[in-house]
């Protein structure tokens, strides 16, 4: 195996990489499908902006707190729970669109659920890489994840356009829901080392520390400062 693919020899990284790549691909399909869905419903770009904002607001609000939780709960469990919540929200959105019962407020509420789930996922995923590969392979592992992210972003948008044209927005979002289910199934198979016990009383102090770091530079909570983002 080539040196730059060496992290894929590690079982836990392979599972994480596959789950992350699949969910990224599905996540890149969703915005394309959602844009066409909203334009079909109301034809309003303002409504689309409101739905996108509904996703980003909880993502920003919960990011710091969720980074602290990711330091206390096994990261793969956090990611499985976040993927399951995202799968459910996207499945409901897909069902509403396919049956013709979707309204803008439905999509905004479900987008908020998806954004909150993502806020749990990102800090956990950013800190999990050092737990899946030896230190000398950390750079290669993060490079592979960055490549997967770039490829999924381009490929997912193209696939999303095809699915919308061929089957409709609802079915494209259903594919996104399925990608979260598959990703959660893969990540659930991971076996990570146990976390070091942390005192509950430090929760507030760590929240303050995370907020201070967030204000003075880019980041997504305590976990995102422990390793390069995936």
Image (cartoon, rainbow, N blue to C red):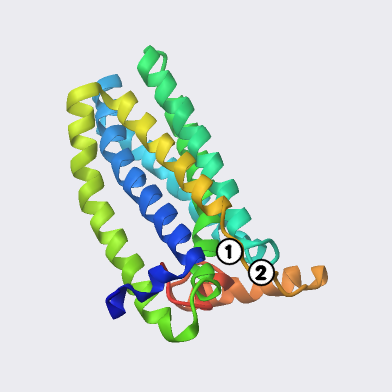
Residue 207: image tag: 2
Mark drawn on residue 98: none
Image quadrant holding the N terminus, namely: bottom left
Q: Residue at x 30, y 20 (%)?
A: 41
State the image coordinates of residue 13 (x, y, percent, origin top left). Answer: 46, 66
Pointers 2 and 1 in contact (C-beta within 8 Å): yes
Query: Is 145 displayed left or right of 159 in the figure?
Result: right
Frontmost residue, 189 versus 24? 189
Q: x, y (%) of residue 167?
A: 24, 22
Near-viewer residue (99 or 12): 12
Query: SS of the residue at dot 1?
Result: helix
Residue labelled with disc 1: 64
The quadrant of the rendering that contains the C terminus is bottom left
Real-space Cα separation, disc 2 to disc 1, in angstroms: 7 Å
The residue carrying pointer 1 sits among few (fewer than 14), some (14 to 19) or many (20 or more) residues within 10 Å by Cα, namely many
Q: Is residue 49 above or below residue 210?
A: above
Query: 218 or 158: which is nearer to us?
Result: 158
**Which image quarter: residue 150?**
bottom left
Residue 228 position in % (x across, y down): 43, 76
Determine the secondary structure under disc 2. Answer: helix
Q: Earlier in the sequence, mark 2 or mark 1?
A: 1
């Amino acid at each position: 195996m080539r040196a730059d693919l060496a992290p894929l020899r590690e079982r836990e990284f392979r599972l994480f990489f596959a789950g992350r790549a699949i969910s990224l691909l599905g996540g890149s399909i969703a915005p394309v499908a959602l844009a066409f869905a909203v334009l079909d419903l109301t034809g309003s770009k303002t409504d689309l902006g409101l739905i996108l904002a509904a996703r980003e607001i909880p993502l920003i609000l919960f990011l710091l707190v969720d980074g602290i939780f990711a330091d206390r709960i096994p990261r793969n469990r956090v990611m499985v729970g976040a993927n399951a919540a995202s799968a459910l929200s996207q499945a409901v959105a897909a069902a509403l669109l396919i049956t013709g019962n979707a309204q803008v407020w439905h999509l905004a509420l479900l987008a908020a659920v998806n954004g909150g789930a993502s806020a749990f996922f990102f800090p956990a995923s950013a800190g999990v890489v050092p737990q899946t590969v030896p230190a000398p392979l950390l750079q290669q592992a993060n490079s592979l994840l960055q490549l997967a992210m770039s490829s999924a972003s381009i490929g997912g948008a193209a696939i999303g356009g095809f699915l919308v044209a061929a089957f409709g927005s609802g079915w494209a979002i259903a594919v996104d829901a399925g990608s979260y289910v598959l990703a959660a199934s893969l990540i659930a198979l991971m076996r990570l080392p146990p976390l070091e016990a942390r005192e509950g009383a430090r929760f507030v102090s760590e929240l303050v520390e995370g907020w201070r770091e967030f204000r003075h530079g880019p980041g997504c909570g305590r976990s995102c400062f422990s390793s390069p983002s995936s």
